[in-house]
């Protein structure tokens, strides 16, 4: 492998023996992933200094290879310096690790850290991940203030400003301030590039692309493909998986759910091979099944994710599992159970302060209202969500709102209005068509055709209805959108499809 800053930037801050061993392992390795495995092999089979053992744990943690972290732990190679990283891997997998235990481990680690550079690397890498699992970190401000001040003042620590920028971006994203978040990410990428740190670059690119995928699909796809290619060269398996998952998100936005699920399943397989939890992938797949109208598949997945979330502390501030379970229950016609799950989801979302969670829980509340034929209430909910998203669009949420509003619009047409030879059911169908054309959403466009076919059926224009269904059948031949056939059959069970 070529030398990379991810490894070599520590050289001025470690002893000669540690530097020599890291260099020799790097000389033998094919890429960064192979380097990390070889370093762990060496540490697990030979007597090693505490600092070298720390780096073995650090690189395995940083590469998201928790099977290697497990091996290091089982061979007694995790000292006080690496313990916070080990505990965080266990928390991410669902083990109960209290915030007090995490804080105590970090306190001990910082006491034995040999210098400010190692202190900054350990604390910021840990906190960069821990803040997603421990909301308590928001009020634990003294350590981050001390280290952030040190990073700003000490040029030897300049690289670590990238972590601070990414953490600020997370805060902006939770407030749905995507433009501000993107600006922070761009600065972080520039620093990572300057210091030749491609692992951080991959993660930051994926996050930034995730922020723009609702407004610039083409650029987001280009960024995710770049992140995947870079991860492949590095041997960074979870980076490859994260890029695939995000490409799946884009396919889902476009209504290409069969492709989206395939990407997500591949990501799930990668995570499983690395010893990472798979429930996050399961939750995303459940959401996709819900959008396809496949309540049973969504229910089975969402139920296991809720069980995981309630039995551990990992997802205690994530409302999405309960939201998706509620949605699946709506799809299955179990409305009372759905209402109970939504109450839980609403409470969690409100407590989290995450505007995206609150919006999507509200969205499913509208879906439940619609299913129970409370059309006025449902319409109000969907309109409120759309109004909120005017300046900060979230395309999949807008897709769902417009589809549901058009369905309600068709359902509420009177006999008198149906006699008027309407080309469209009304303003919501017109907005839906405009939306899919503007944003290049082929799967959602096909669903708009199905709704137009439903309108034609209500109007008694059966020839036009059949022509529209034929169009959908043609679109459904694409492997990415095969689900459209099942959707068409469920909507038109009395029509023979050939």
Image (cartoon, rainbow, N blue to C red):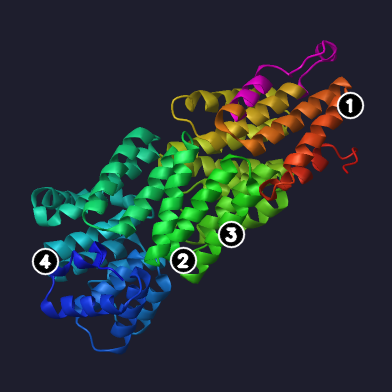
Helix, strand or loop at disc 1? helix
Mark 4 in CB contact with mark 1 (< 8 angstroms): no
Residue at the image position 44 percent from the left and 62 percent from the top: 238
Q: Position of residue 164 (x, y in %)?
A: 24, 48
Q: Quadrant of residue 398?
A: top right
Residue at the image position 26 percent from the left and 64 percent from the top: 4
Residue count near mark 1 (Cα–Cα under 10 Å), binned few <14, some 14–19, many ≥20 = few
Mark before the other along the chain sequence, 4 or 3: 4
Mark 4 against mark 1, which lies toward the viewer? Answer: 1
Q: According to the image, label 2 marks what residue?
A: 276
Gap between marks 4 and 1 measured at Cα: 78 Å
Q: Position of residue 301 (x, y in %)?
A: 63, 56
Q: Which is nearer the eye, 405 or 343?
A: 405
Mark 3 in CB contact with mark 2 (< 8 angstroms): no
Check residue 265 in the rendering and tell me which mark sits there, or answer none: 3
Tell me: residue 408, above or below residue 290.
Answer: above
């Amino acid at each position: 492998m070529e030398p990379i800053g991810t490894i070599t930037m520590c050289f001025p801050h470690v002893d000669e023996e540690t530097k020599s061993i890291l260099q020799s392992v790097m000389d033998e390795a094919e890429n960064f992933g192979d380097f990390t495995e070889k370093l762990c092999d060496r540490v697990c089979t030979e007597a090693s200094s505490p600092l070298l053992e720390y780096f073995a744990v650090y690189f395995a943690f940083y590469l998201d290879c928790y099977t290697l972290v497990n091996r290091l732990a089982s061979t007694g190679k995790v000292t006080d310096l690496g313990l916070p990283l080990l505990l965080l891997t266990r928390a991410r997998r669902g083990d109960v690790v209290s915030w007090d235990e995490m804080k105590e481990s970090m306190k001990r680690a910082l006491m034995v850290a040999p210098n400010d550079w190692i202190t900054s690397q350990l604390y910021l890498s840990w906190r960069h991940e821990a803040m997603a699992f421990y909301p308590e970190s928001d009020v634990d401000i003294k350590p981050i203030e001390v280290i952030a001040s040190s990073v700003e003042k000490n040029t030897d620590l300049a690289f670590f400003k990238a972590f601070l920028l990414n953490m600020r971006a997370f805060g902006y994203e939770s407030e749905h301030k995507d433009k501000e978040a993107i600006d922070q990410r761009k600065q972080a990428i520039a620093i990572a590039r300057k210091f030749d740190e491609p692992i951080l670059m991959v993660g930051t690119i994926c996050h930034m692309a995730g922020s723009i995928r609702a407004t610039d699909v083409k650029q987001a796809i280009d960024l995710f493909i770049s992140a995947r290619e870079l991860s492949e060269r590095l041997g960074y398996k979870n980076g490859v998986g994260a890029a695939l998952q995000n490409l799946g998100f884009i396919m889902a936005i476009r209504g290409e759910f069969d492709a989206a699920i395939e990407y997500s399943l591949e990501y799930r397989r990668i995570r499983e091979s690395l010893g990472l939890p798979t429930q996050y992938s399961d939750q995303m797949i459940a959401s996709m099944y819900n959008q396809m109208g496949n309540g049973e598949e969504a229910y089975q997945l969402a139920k296991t994710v809720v069980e995981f979330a309630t039995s551990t502390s990992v997802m205690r501030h994530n409302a999405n599992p309960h939201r998706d379970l509620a949605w699946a229950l709506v799809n299955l016609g179990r409305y009372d159970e759905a209402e109970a799950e939504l109450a839980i989801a609403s409470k969690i979302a409100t407590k989290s302060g995450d505007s995206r969670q609150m919006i999507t829980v509200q969205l499913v509340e509208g879906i439940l209202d619609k299913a129970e034929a409370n059309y006025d209430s449902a319409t109000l909910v969907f309109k409120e969500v759309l109004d909120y998203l005017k300046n900060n669009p979230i395309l999949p949420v807008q897709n769902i709102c417009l589809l549901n509003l058009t369905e309600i619009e068709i359902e509420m047409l009177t006999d008198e209005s149906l006699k008027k030879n309407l080309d469209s059911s009304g303003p919501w169908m017109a907005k839906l068509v405009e939306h899919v054309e503007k944003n290049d959403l082929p799967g959602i466009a096909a669903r708009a055709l199905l709704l137009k076919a439903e309108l034609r059926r209500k109007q008694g224009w059966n020839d036009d209805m059949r022509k529209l269904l034929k169009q959908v059948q043609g679109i459904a031949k694409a492997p990415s959108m095969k689900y459209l056939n099942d959707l068409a059959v469920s909507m038109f069970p009395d029509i023979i499809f050939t």
